[in-house]
Image (cartoon, helix red, strand yellow):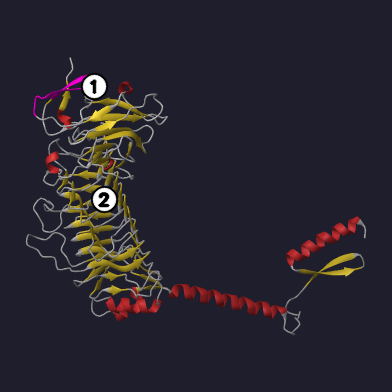
């Protein structure tokens, strides 16, 4: 075959493939031939054209079946309107729920109200059931119990979605004085719920807007608005952890916007995150002329809650914006804004209430204080530890309102110039240790009563010597200090002298002033050290004279007694301790 024919035949082959022709060979030439599928038979004797037609019909039927199956798991409650009893849509909901089985969607069409005289309970073994409206439909609870219940059997189920609905409870929004709200339930109750999502949902008129117990990794987002309830969001212990609240509104709830409760038999709610939320209490029950909240209104109540996070949240118009109690520990508030009421009767305060309220941190938060004298941070019991405010603005720290101290780092006045300013270097309270005893661990002295004692100062910025120093002791080294840190050693006992041995070469040991030993013998004798980048412990300064060095080993017999020891003269200023000898100088 010559090259020209080869090229011609190749082009014919491609043409036949694209347009459904067959190829017939005559000699070296290849010819195109059109096939009529209505007259060509397959091996089983059936015409190919008929087979193609049957196959197309089968594909069309399958497509219809697939469409039918997909629609079967999304129904409208109005498809079952004939099940409604007078104005009660609950029987229609039950029929719709039965039709989708354990998974699927129920649509609430129209901007209309669906009255429910019983709670809507999703099955314990249901998964990914979606209740939604594209039109802002209202589900109105015509009873005093829970409206929607999203409980599940275990973590293998749940993951339900509620979207675009208004969930209305029986409580009035603006009642008169003396009104007792009838609801004892929740708009949405989530007991043993996992990975559920509430998106663009409005919940109002219940005792609890959302009630969560043993709820894990549930998400609340979009334009979700929790309003006009007794409690906006209530986490009722039971390992309610890692729930996320993103950008939602929690406003005008009577008792608290967010209430985290814990009992002694429960797990502690932890690692729940509220970000970009508005938490505000304006006009909840009972109604007051002028739209004022009651005096005891609370934004966030954390009782026995650990490591919950509030990030970039806006608080306004509460007596207490943040109430920490019942061993609340390690909770974080970052970039939050706390604003009092316009009439200044509710101060949006922070309170640390009771024992065990420790390690809570406020960072880059702002309080809109309106003067420098009204306290808006309170502590009501001694023994609270390590609560701190870091790089904040406008908070008023008044000593009479702080039974336990809080650590303050760089508190600045707010934009109107109010707040307790503090910009000095300071040692946080957990950096102080009092009255070290014999031992080798941090905050201990190894070798009390010897001339070769070692003080372990690991992690501390200040140590105060107390009555557990049971004999005259000479410290030759201070261990586990970090390069670049300052360290203060002070004395608050007069029974035994604490000597510090100075390095003589400036290389080894502790480098004291003039490289002469020092003795701490009186109340508040204090010496300050700096640790260089070479790790050398160098004295910065002291508040006592280096000449006060004791050379007499026994106590004076009477005040005014004079003694000479190694060429130095001493006079007694007391007679209870050898520390009462004072060196006579010119």
- Quarter holding the N terminus? bottom right
x then y, percent, for residue 11? 81, 59
* Residue 186 makes an appearance in the image: yes
Residue pointed to by mark 1: 566
Residue farthest to the top, as pictured: 586
Q: Is residue 369 above or below residue 66?
A: above
Mark 1 vs mark 2, foreground winner is 1
Dividing the picture into quadrants, the one containing residue 395 is top left
x then y, percent, for residue 530? 33, 29
x then y, percent, for residue 80? 34, 78
x then y, percent, for residue 34? 78, 71
Residue farthest to the bottom, as pictured: 45
Residue at the image position 25 percent from the left and 29 percent from the top = 519
User: Is 58 on the left or on the right of 119, as rendered?
Assistant: right
Residue at the image position 22 percent from the left and 44 percent from the top = 338
Residue 51 highlighted magenta (yes or no): no
Dividing the picture into quadrants, the one containing residue 428 is top left
The magenta span reads 558-571
* Residue 425 makes an appearance in the image: no
Residue pointed to by mark 2: 278
């Amino acid at each position: 075959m010559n090259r020209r024919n080869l090229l011609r035949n190749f082009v014919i082959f491609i043409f036949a493939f694209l347009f459904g022709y067959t190829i017939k060979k005559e000699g070296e030439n290849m010819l195109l031939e059109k096939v009529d599928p209505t007259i060509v038979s397959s091996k089983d004797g059936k015409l190919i054209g008929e087979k193609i037609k049957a196959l197309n019909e089968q594909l069309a039927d399958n497509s219809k079946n697939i469409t039918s199956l997909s629609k079967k798991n999304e129904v409208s409650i109005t498809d079952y309107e004939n099940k409604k009893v007078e104005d009660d849509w609950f029987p229609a909901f039950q029929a719709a729920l039965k039709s989708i089985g354990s998974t699927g969607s129920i649509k609430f069409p129209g901007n209309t109200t669906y009255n429910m005289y019983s709670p809507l309970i999703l099955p314990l073994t249901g998964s990914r059931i979606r209740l939604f409206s594209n039109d802002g439909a209202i589900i109105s609870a015509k009873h005093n119990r829970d409206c929607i219940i999203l409980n599940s059997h275990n973590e293998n189920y749940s993951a339900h979605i509620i979207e675009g609905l208004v969930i209305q409870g029986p409580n009035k929004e603006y009642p008169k004085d003396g009104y007792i709200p009838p609801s004892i339930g929740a708009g949405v109750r989530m007991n043993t719920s996992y990975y559920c999502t509430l998106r663009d949902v409005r919940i109002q008129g219940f005792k609890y807007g959302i009630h969560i117990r043993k709820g894990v990794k549930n998400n609340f987002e979009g334009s979700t608005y929790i309003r006009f309830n007794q409690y906006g969001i209530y986490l009722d212990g039971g390992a309610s952890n890692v729930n996320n609240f993103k950008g939602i509104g929690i406003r005008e709830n009577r008792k608290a916007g967010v209430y985290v409760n814990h009992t002694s038999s429960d797990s502690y709610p932890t690692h729940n995150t509220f970000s970009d939320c508005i938490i505000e209490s304006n006009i909840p029950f009972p109604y007051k002329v002028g739209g004022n909240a009651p005096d005891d209104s609370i934004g966030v109540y954390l009782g026995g809650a650990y490591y919950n996070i509030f990030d970039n949240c806006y608080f306004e118009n509460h007596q207490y914006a943040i109430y920490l109690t019942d061993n609340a520990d390690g909770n974080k508030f970052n970039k939050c804004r706390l604003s009092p009421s316009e009439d200044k009767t509710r101060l949006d305060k922070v309170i640390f209430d009771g024992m065990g309220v420790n390690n809570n941190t406020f960072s880059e938060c702002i309080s809109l204080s309106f003067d420098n004298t009204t306290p808006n941070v309170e502590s009501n019991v001694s023994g609270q530890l390590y609560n701190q405010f870091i790089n904040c603005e406008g908070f008023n720290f008044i000593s009479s309102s702080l039974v336990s101290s809080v650590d303050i780092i760089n508190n600045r006045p707010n934009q109107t110039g109010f707040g307790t300013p503090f910009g000095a270097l300071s040692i946080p309270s957990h950096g102080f240790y009092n009255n070290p005893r014999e031992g080798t661990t941090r905050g201990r002295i190894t070798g009390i009563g010897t001339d070769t004692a070692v003080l372990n100062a690991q992690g501390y910025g200040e140590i105060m010597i107390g009555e557990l120093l049971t004999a005259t002791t000479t410290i030759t080294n201070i261990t586990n200090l970090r390069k670049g840190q300052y360290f203060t050693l002070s004395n608050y006992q007069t029974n035994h002298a604490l000597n510090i041995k100075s390095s003589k070469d400036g290389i080894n040991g502790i480098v004291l002033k003039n490289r002469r030993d020092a003795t701490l013998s009186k109340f508040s004798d204090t010496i300050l050290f700096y640790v260089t980048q070479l790790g050398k412990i160098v004295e910065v300064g002291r508040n006592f004279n280096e000449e006060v060095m004791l050379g007499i080993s026994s106590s004076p017999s009477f005040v005014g007694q004079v003694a000479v020891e190694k060429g130095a003269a001493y006079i007694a200023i007391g007679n209870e301790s050898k520390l009462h000898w004072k060196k006579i100088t010119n």
